[in-house]
Image (spheres, coloured by chain):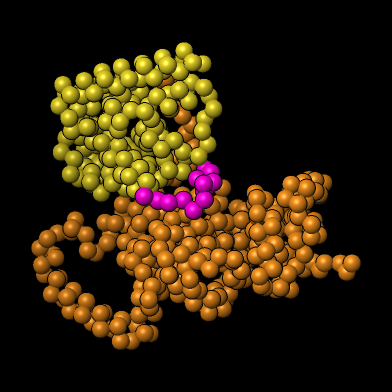
Chain colours: A orange, B yellow
């Protein structure tokens, strides 16, 4: 018994988890309202803090632009956790409903960039982040964000601002056949390193992106197994549902601004063909599937269904 | 540098000493946490939480020689809090927790089943005594339980484990 305890596999990410714990501790210490601070300090400051609070409350409630400008500040609330990524995906948040993903901002800070998601309920800032899932994939470098319990996605208006960023190629909403889920993709121009922090009171999810020169070398092309290009609409969701079960499925936008479902990317054309046939057989998918050769960082091609 | 010396510096506020010390304990923290949740992601999250709590509370530790006992206590509380919290989570679909990768090694499976059948306190006490080779006195500190009770908790736990493991042998 003792032996099997000693044989518990120690993952490589362990030391990172330790570093993250320390970092979170440091951030917590920097929070201005912790009890850790000197008590004499609190007494002297409390009067001016109360005044500031009144100003903020009036400001937020009466001037919408004021509230908006506050939401652009990353990590306004308390840090809940720093996400642990496993094979490029991670999740966080708690179950909420009737959420509006109301606001996304992007901020450049030196060589880093932060993308901040804000959540609202009945027009007020939500206190805890809705449950969310985030994954990073390649060919092209894409971040896929899924927010559960969300009925509205006002932040679609902010995609234009996102696209102005030097590292972001595109940002687009994905059709989801579930009226309580909001999904979107952000395509990056290059390989990036990423870190995701979750905050509460108010709820924010902050994604920090930086270029990753080590991974920014031209890599060999891959072969993608995918559907034909489809205009934005229900049929994208239907194709996705029919292919449900494919392990690395994702929905992407092509060069023409059309959408398609990809079931996986493979190193060789032969492997892609074999996988394509396997999917057709296992899932009984009858619409045509294609193998597309895709270079590193290339936006997917548009493929039309051949006329029959 | 000696552990107690590092702990003394960490208590005084030296972040470097804290980092060295905690990194040297990370595998131990991982194994202990793993005993409770048995999957990699959750264990890593518990380790992160443990380090976070330890970082914030280190200045309250009065005697550097108790660093290990103190850290163990935080790790176990973090693990138990995590389990309590995650019990409230409802998964959307049964396959949603697919990240659990049970070890099919037969011996490990036995250990897992047998340990899981014990209550939290017995499980923790047995893990600390037999896997971490901790002194009974220190276990009593970690569990906030009198030494005599720790002895009986371990004794009873072992009795039950013996029955459990014995049963599965006669069947298999």
Residue B40 percent coordinates (x, y): 47, 39
Residue B56 percent coordinates (x, y): 25, 49
What residue sits 38% from the left and 78% below the top? A123
Going by the image, does A11 lie left or right of A234?
Answer: left
Q: Is residue A173 above or below residue B82?
A: below
Q: Is residue A105 above or below residue B157?
A: below
Give the image quarter of residue B59.
top left
Going by the image, does B96 lie left or right of A97?
Answer: right
Q: Which residue is farthest top?
A: B170
Q: Which residue is farthest bottom?
A: A62
Give the image quarter of residue B114.
top left
Q: Depth check: B106 or A9 in front?
A: B106
Q: Depth check: A125 or A140 in front?
A: A125
Say whether residue B169 is visible: yes
Q: Which residues are magenta?
A: B88-99
Residue A241 percent coordinates (x, y): 65, 59
What residue sits 78% from the left and 47% below the top? A281
Residue B24 percent coordinates (x, y): 36, 34
What residue sits 15% from the left and 27% below the top? B146
The quadrant the N terminus of chain B occupies is: top left
Q: Which residue is farthest front?
A: B171
Give the image quarter of residue B136.
top left
Going by the image, does B40 lie left or right of A164?
Answer: left
Say whether residue A138 is visible: no
| Residue B59 among those drawn in magenta | no
What residue sits 41% from the left and 38% below the top? B37
Magenta part, dominant SS? loop
Q: Depth check: A147 or B64 in front?
A: A147
């Amino acid at each position: 018994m003792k032996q099997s305890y000693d044989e518990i596999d120690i993952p490589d990410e362990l030391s990172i988890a330790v570093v993250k714990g320390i970092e979170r501790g440091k951030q917590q210490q920097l929070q201005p309202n912790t009890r850790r601070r000197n008590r004499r300090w609190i007494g002297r400051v409390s009067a001016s803090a109360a005044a500031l609070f009144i100003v903020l409350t009036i400001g937020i409630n009466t001037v919408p632009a004021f509230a908006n400008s506050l939401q652009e500040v990353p990590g306004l609330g308390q840090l809940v956790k720093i996400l642990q990524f496993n094979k490029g995906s991670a999740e966080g948040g708690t179950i909420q409903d009737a959420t509006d993903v109301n606001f996304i901002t992007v901020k450049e800070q030196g060589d880093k960039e932060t993308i901040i998601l804000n959540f609202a309920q009945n027009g007020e800032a939500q206190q805890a982040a809705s449950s969310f899932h985030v994954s990073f994939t390649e060919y092209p470098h894409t971040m896929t964000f899924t927010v559960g319990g969300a009925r509205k996605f006002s932040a679609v208006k902010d995609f234009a601002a996102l696209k102005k960023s030097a590292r972001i190629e595109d940002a687009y909403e994905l059709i989801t056949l579930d009226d309580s889920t909001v999904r979107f993709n952000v395509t990056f121009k290059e390989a990036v390193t990423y870190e995701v922090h979750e905050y509460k009171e108010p709820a924010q999810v902050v994604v920090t992106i930086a270029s990753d020169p080590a991974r920014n070398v031209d890599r060999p092309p891959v072969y993608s197994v995918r559907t034909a290009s489809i205009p934005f609409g229900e049929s994208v969701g239907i194709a996705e549902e029919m292919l449900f079960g494919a392990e690395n499925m994702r929905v992407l936008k092509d060069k023409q601004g059309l959408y398609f479902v990809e079931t996986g990317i493979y190193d060789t054309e032969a492997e892609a063909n074999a996988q394509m046939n396997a999917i057709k057989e296992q899932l009984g998918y009858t619409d045509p599937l294609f193998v597309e050769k895709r270079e590193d960082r290339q936006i997917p091609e548009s493929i039309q269904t051949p006329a029959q | 540098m000696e552990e107690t010396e590092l702990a003394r510096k960490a208590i005084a506020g030296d972040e470097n000493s804290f980092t060295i010390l905690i990194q040297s304990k990370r595998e131990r923290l991982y194994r202990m946490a793993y005993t409770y949740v048995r999957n990699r992601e959750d264990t890593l999250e518990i380790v992160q939480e443990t380090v976070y709590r330890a970082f914030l509370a280190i200045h309250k530790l009065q005697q550097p020689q108790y660093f290990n006992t103190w850290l163990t206590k935080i790790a176990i509380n973090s693990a138990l809090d995590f389990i309590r919290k995650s019990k409230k989570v409802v998964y959307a679909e049964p396959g949603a927790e697919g990240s659990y990768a049970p070890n099919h090694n037969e011996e490990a499976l036995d250990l897992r089943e047998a340990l899981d059948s014990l209550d939290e306190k017995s499980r923790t006490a047995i893990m600390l005594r037999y896997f971490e080779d901790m002194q009974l006195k220190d276990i009593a500190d970690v569990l906030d339980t009198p030494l005599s009770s720790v002895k009986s908790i371990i004794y009873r736990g072992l009795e039950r484990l013996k029955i459990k493991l014995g049963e599965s042998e006669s069947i298999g």
